[in-house]
Structures are given as C-alpha cells and as structure tokens.
Image (tube, rainbow, N blue to C red):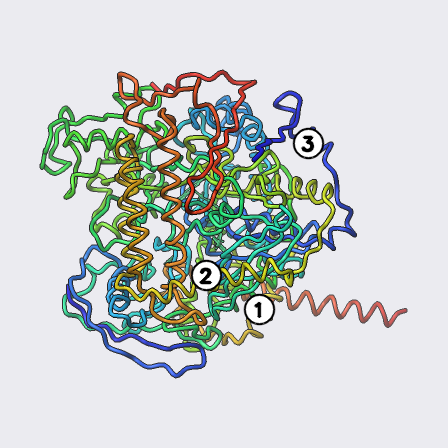
Amino acid sequence: MKLDAKTPSGPLDQKWSRFLLEMKLVSPANKRKLDVIVVGAGLAGASASASLGELGYNVKCFCFHDSPRRAHSISAQGGINAAKNYANDGDSVYRLFYDTIKGGDFRSREANVYRLAEVSSNIIDQCVAQGVPFAREYGGLLANRSFGGAQVSRTFYARGQTGQQLLIGAYQALARQIDQGTVEMHPRTEMLDLVVIDGRAAGIVVRNLVTGEITSHSADAVVLATGGYGNVFYLSTNARGCNATAIFRAYKKGAAFANPCFTQIHPTCIPVSGDQQSKLTLMSESLRNDGRIWVPRKKGDSRAATDIPEDERDYYLERKYPSFGNLAPRDISSRAAKEVCDEGRGVGPTGKGVYLDFADSINRLGADVVKERYGNLFEMYERITGEDAYKTPMRIYPASHYTMGGLWVDYLLMSNVPGLFVIGEANYSDHGANRLGASALMQGLADGYFVLPNTIGHYLAETKPQKIQSSHPEFKNAEDATASRIHGILQTNGTRSPYSFHRQLGKLVWEKCGMARSESTLKEALELIPKLRAEFDRDLRVPGTASEFNQTLEHALRVEEYFELAELMCRDALMRAESCGAHFREEFQTPDGEAFRDDENFSYVAAWEYQGRSKPPALHKEQLEYEEVEMTQRSYK
Amino acid sequence: MNLTLKIWRQQNSKAQGEFVEYKVTDVSEDISFLEMLDVLNEDLIERGEDPVAFDSDCREGICGACSIVVNGIPHGHQSGTTVCQLHMRHFDDSQKIVVEPFRAKPFPIIKDLVIDRSAMDRVIQAGGFISVGTNQFAEANAIPVPKDVAESAMDAASCIGCGACVAVCKNASAMLFVAAKVSHLNLLPQGKPEKDRRVTNMIRTMDAEGFGNCTNIGACETACPKGVSLDFIAQMNRDYAKAIIKGQLLNASQTAAQETK
Ligand SMILES: Cc1cc2nc3c(=O)[nH]c(=O)nc-3n(C[C@H](O)[C@H](O)[C@H](O)COP(=O)(O)OP(=O)(O)OC[C@H]3O[C@@H](n4cnc5c(N)ncnc54)[C@H](O)[C@@H]3O)c2cc1C
Ligand code: FES
C-alpha cells in the first residue's frame, strides 16, 4: 500500500491557493453526467451534498436517520472556531493553525491544518448568509467566547445550541437542492458495504431500514461523512445511533484506518449514575470559561461542597497549569480529573467526579448573566441529576466524546482507495492526537463546503469515468454477502441482546484502552476481545426478520463491527510506545506526570491495512514532516 | 421502581394496532423514560419476543427524534422536556403508564411508536431556507443584526422538528412548526428578500401535506419541548397576509400593464 499525501509544493500559506489555481475542472455539461454518493448528512455530509448539488453533479445522499436534520452534529453545544480576530486579541490564521497543531500534540499534517485555519473565516461568512442566528453584541456584530487550548477568543456560538443551528443551516441548503432535484435524499437507509471495482470505489450496498430491502447504488465517487466511532465505548456523549459501520466496511475493502487509538475523552460530562444508563451527557466546555474545577484537599471528604471551606479545596487545574487554568486542553484536564479521583479525592456517590463550581462567577457577574450564558446547560443538568447548579456545584467526569482517528486521507480528502473520499469526523485528518474544542464543527464544514467540492472535481476531471452500473456482478456479490451476514445474525438464536454485548465490550475498552493505557492492559484486551466476539457469534439473540423495521438487527450489525475495531484500537495503542495527546501510555510519562512524546520514533500517522480476519492488519507509516513549526514539548503551564 | 406499561403495538403501517400490557421491574429512578423502555426491551429480546420500536438518537432533547405520547401528553407531563429527557424520578412507584406514538394523519405509523415525519421535511424543502449557495456571502460582520432581532430569530430557530405541536393539536395543524421556520428566516435581514415567496410556498405545501387548520387553541405552545411561542404564528399570519396582498397587487398591475398594451 502506498500512502501519498499529495501535499502541494510551495510555502505553507500558498499551498491551498496554488491547488485551487492548478486543479483540473469539470465542465458544467460533464458535471450533469457524473454521479456522486454522499453517505451521511451531518455537518460534513449535508454541506458537501448541498455544495455538490449546487455545482451540478447528480448527488445521492444517504442517512440512517428519519431526516437529515437529526444527525449527531445537532447536539454540539459550545461553538465553532474561526480566525476572524473580531476580538482584536491577536488572533490570526497562523495562530489558529499553530494552536491546532500544538493541541494535537504534533501528530497531524501541517498542510491540512493550515488550510483548515485558512478557510475557517469563510465558514462564518457562509453560515451568517444562510441565516444561522449566532450570538451578537449590542452593536449588532458577532459575539465570541473562549475555549480550551487557546488564549484568544475565537469561538462563535448560538446559545448552547451551536451544532443545532449550523446543522439546520446545512440541512436547509440541502433541502433547497432536494427541492431543485439535484440531490436525491435517502433517509432511513444504512450503508452496509462499499463496493470496489478495478481498485476504485464504485458504489455502496444499503439496507432500507423500513422495509429491510437491500439494494446497490453505483457512482463515479463515494464520499463517507458518517461521523466518529466513540460509541465503541458504549457509554459516550455520542448519539445512540452513531456507529462505525461505514468506515469499517470501507477498511475491510482496502481503505487504510489511521490512528485508531486516538480517541478523545472529554473532561466535562455528567458522571455515570448506574447500569441502566444508555449514554452520557456532555456539559459544554464553554462552562470552563466561568466555572472553576476543584476537589477537596482531603481524601474521602464527605461534606457537602458548600460546607468545604476555601482553603480546603484544591483547584488543581489552576494550580498545575497557571497560564491556562480551567481552560487547559481536554486531554490534560481529563487526565488530571482521573488522577485526583484515583487518589481518592473524587466527589459524588461513586467517587468518580469533580466539582465545576459557578459560585465565584455568580458573585462576580450575577446569576442573570450566568443564566443568559449557560441557562440551557444548567437546565439540562438539573433534568438529568435533579440538582440545581446555581446553588451547588456541578459534578463532572470525563467521558468518551470524539474520535480523532478515522480513515486515512490525503490532502484531497481521498482515501488510498481512489474515488473514496472521507470527510468530517470519519476521517483522521486535522486533529492529530487531540482535538481542541470547537474545532470539529469547523472541520466538518470546512471539508463539506470548501475543500471537498473542489478536490472531488479535480479527481473526477483527472479520471476517466468507469460508468459501472449497479447491475455489475460485484454489486450482486456484495449484496449476497450482506444478506448472508444478516441471515447469520438472525439464525444465531442465543440468549443475549446486542445491547448486553455492546455494554460489556464498551466497559472493557474503557478500562483497558481508555484514558490511560499500558502494555499489560492492552495485551489483556487483545485476549479478551476475541473471546467476547466468539461469544457474540454463539450467543446473540435478535428477534424478528430481515424484511421489516428491526432495530435490534440494526444494532447487532453495528456491534458486530465494534469488536474488530476495538481490537484495532488496542493494537494501535500497543504499537505506539509513547504518550501523545489523548493517547496516554502509563509507561511513558515525564517525572511530573505529563505525556512523554517520542518524536524520534513515532512522529508518523499509523495507517492500518486489513488483511482478513485471520491475519493481523499491516502497519503503514506516513512520516510527518514539519516545515513550518518546531515540534516542542507541549506546555500549558 | 416497578411499573405497568400499556404500550401501543403495531407491526407495520398496514397492520391493526392494539395496546399490550407489560411489567418492568427494578427501574432506577435516575434513568430516563427511554432508558426505562430499553430495560423492557432487553428483557423482551432475551425472552425472544419482539421489542418495542421507538425512535431516539441524541437523548439530550435536541435532535427531535423521540416522539412518544406518555399518558395522553406528547413527550409526557414535564413541561419544556422531550421524552428522552423525562426522568423516572417524576413518576410514582407502581404507576400505570400509557405509551403511544405521536398520532396525526400526516404522520403514518411505521411500527409501534415509530412514525414517518417526512412531511415536515417537505415543508422545509418548499421554502424553509435562504437561497444562497456555497461561497455566495459577504463578510459576516458586513450586515449588523440588532441583538434583539438575533435573539428572537434564535428563539424561533430553537424548534427541534419533533412534531409534538402537530400531535397535540386536534386539527393536526403544523402552524407552530412552520411559523417557527418562517419567523426565524423572515426576521433576519438575510432572509428578507424572499420573505413573501417563503411564507406562501411553505403554507401551500403544509396544506397539501394534509396538516389541518389552526383554530387558535394554543395546545401546541404548551406541548412544545422548546417553548416556541405562539407569537410566531401571529407573526407568520401577518407575513402571509402581506404576501397575499402584495401578490394580488402585483397581479393586478400586471393585468393592467397587459391591457394597456
Ligand atoms: C455532545 C457533543 C457536543 C459537541 N460539541 C461540539 C462543539 O461545541 N464544537 C465542536 O466543534 N464540536 C463539537 N462536537 C463534535 C462534533 O459535533 C462532531 O464531531 C461533528 O458534528 C461530526 O459531524 P459529522 O458530519 O462528521 O458526523 P455526524 O454529525 O455524526 O453525521 C453522521 C451522518 O452519517 C449518517 N450515517 C452514519 N453511518 C451511516 C451508515 N452506515 N449509513 C448511512 N448513513 C450513516 C448519519 O445518519 C448522519 O447523517 C460535539 C460532539 C458531541 C458528542
Ligand atoms: S432523542 Fe433526541 S430529542 Fe429525544
């Protein structure tokens, strides 16, 4: 397998404009003859489908939701970054680029990240033109807030519902194209396989979730915008439906999977309450602007938070990272929370929690201002926990939230399988080993509105269309294979639901390959996962049939992919004998407990190639060359 | 907690449905209503019975997927709360709970508690957008928007498209849903140029999809988990009336112009 990043030559700040200048174009008459499949209608998929439809391609867009408006992107709360420098605090494209590279602990590709920072401003312009109701100041201009890992205020927001408003903007642009007939929308349809013919992506196999019918769709290019795989942990802040099926099937058809072990654990989530819980809820990172994080100094202190005097509290982030304080990046904040809880200083019924306290802000700003800024989050907190955070501090704990890893892509956002593009959280591209807050929305929309519509055109112009129909035997083969997988699942007739397997697997991955990993936990996991998988194959029970609306079957098909994905994550984490960003190997830490990165041996992207179920995957390396920035030890002190 | 549930079971859109009674035991009061249904379903699956189908995704009250009527009320009795955020601590132990899908003619039942709300998407496709394409923009701060206007637009834009307003209305009217979108876009300077077209096309499509008329009862506002205000309906009615009058004037002047030719 050859990994060619296809980064344009020239100085960093001219690469993208040079690409745009030199790229090949498809004429309007030819665009009408080209079919593009987009799987996913979240921020990345909806923005890409709408933009491609506007350009004149024949677009088919698929999502498993009943409407594209419900994609997981809708639940993003805090905001979206852009280097507008409206706050006049010294922000610039370069600074956003640098913060992102550094935040990612020097494990992402310079040229991609620079382009992301470059187009960030356009995203805000685009969204405002679409009517996204961003927060504004009294003068009528756009408002900003700060987010973790940055010392400037560059985050745009729409109350605590930024993802909702951005997605609705993209959904509306998509709706307009559906109305104009340039995009054919297929909701409640799940992609179950990728079809590759003569080494190129030729189409997909899908299941209609209402009727169970399995059909094929061919195209000149396939775009996966199917989101992240954080639900491999079972409990996560992701929506219930988020899954890895599309990218993992593509992996099995030859697309390289990059950095699977880079999974982000978000520091501010509502702690786990019990076994019957189905998901965890994020409390937006924006709360760290005005909330202070602390635990009692004393172990096992069982007094109510408000009874603990100031000098018996440990504001550990402010103490350890004075210049970033409560806004230290996610990986660092999460690990610090784990550390104090492991010491026995955690709070709440399970001891797995720390306080996020607004008392000072309420005193300083008044409860009204705090309510205006975070009212909906406080309400959500109360609904879930039954506690009033205006009176007593919130309790929070880290949880699985985002996956930096994903399918490997080049500068054009194309995987190593020609014609297969991957955008949004589904690819591995821009966030290295750790993503900064408010940068996922930025990346999803950058990919969908501004990057992919150009790069896919370049590919299509350069490539002679194959014009393969979905009647090609390869499609029939893939349909048959899918049907027989489904048949196998329905025939198993064991005793356990897919949920119970998912829960067990998730717990295992969380414990062995979660916030901290070590050689021994990873080796253990690599032994336990195949055993659990064997039990799944033997003891699964899925009632109902294949030819009806069957949610248990949908879930079983998703869980089936998680076993091998979990194995791949552990394998990758074991291979990466260093700590960087969110990947913390206990054996590799500095004397003061920070991640100990090994640039000499590991400054590469690990791209894994599937070799069949009986053989371990092969590792390929894309060496990361830093021309512009100097790789330094990350410090937020 | 131990509960008795009376749940609407319907195999598919064509089948006859019926209520079936189930018991769920040992439910933690810290879980949500949907998690309580998960507990029931896991039990059903392990017994080899067909679990209860229901839609959900975010389980945070923002995606609008969940669509269940609890004891006669869409999303249940806690105001301003979707059913995925309704927690069991608000129910009594041993309580009997009736569980049904959102019911309205434009929302056919797919299975059990799952309904087809694609009619709402089609209303949006008729005009619930601003006609700008990718890259067709001015600098974001070029058009200042007064804070109160932006806030009002945001209030309207908070709609999650769940359809509770339709389900609760005895006429199955979608006025609150449509008004929320029309107001969100018509309030903003960016949305003004196609204000008239938007409101007329969306209302026409709403009628064609079989949503009923609004008779000003206001149940929709009470049922809305996001507190979208009835005022937006009044606002849309004004926009609609203006658009109709302008349309008539335009027609009249065109006819006059033709006659003089
Ligand atoms: C609670 C929460 C809060 C967040 N807040 C922020 C924030 O404030 N700022 C920020 O920048 N980021 C935030 N993020 C991260 C961000 O929301 C996501 O990374 C981003 O929205 C992902 O967008 P996407 O388009 O790649 O994928 P998604 O929005 O997940 O969309 C995936 C799409 O693919 C479809 N799909 C998936 N699999 C299939 C299949 N097999 N077949 C057919 N269709 C399929 C789905 O139906 C959906 O339409 C947050 C994440 C969470 C969990
Ligand atoms: S599941 Fe998303 S709003 Fe209820």
Q: Which residue is mark 3?
A: A19
Q: Pick whichever, A200 or A287, lies toward us.
A: A200
Identify the residue at the far bottom of this view: B16
Q: Amino acid at mark 3?
A: Phe
Q: Residue at x 16, y 37 (%)?
A: A347
Residue A578 percent across, percent down from the top left:
36, 24
Marks 3 and 2: same chain? no
Q: Quadrant of residue B39?
A: bottom left
Assign a secondary structure to mark 3.
helix
Question: Which chain is disc 2 placed on?
Answer: B
Q: Pick whichever, B239 or B70, lies toward us.
A: B70
Observer-side mark, 3 or 1, equals 3
What distance separates the C-alpha of mark 3 from that of mark 1?
Answer: 45 Å
Q: Which residue is mark 2?
A: B161
Q: Amino acid at mark 1?
A: Ile
Marks 3 and 1: same chain? no
Q: Which residue is mark 1?
A: B203
Residue A579 percent across, percent down from the top left:
35, 25
Circles 3 and 2: CB atoms closer than 8 Å: no
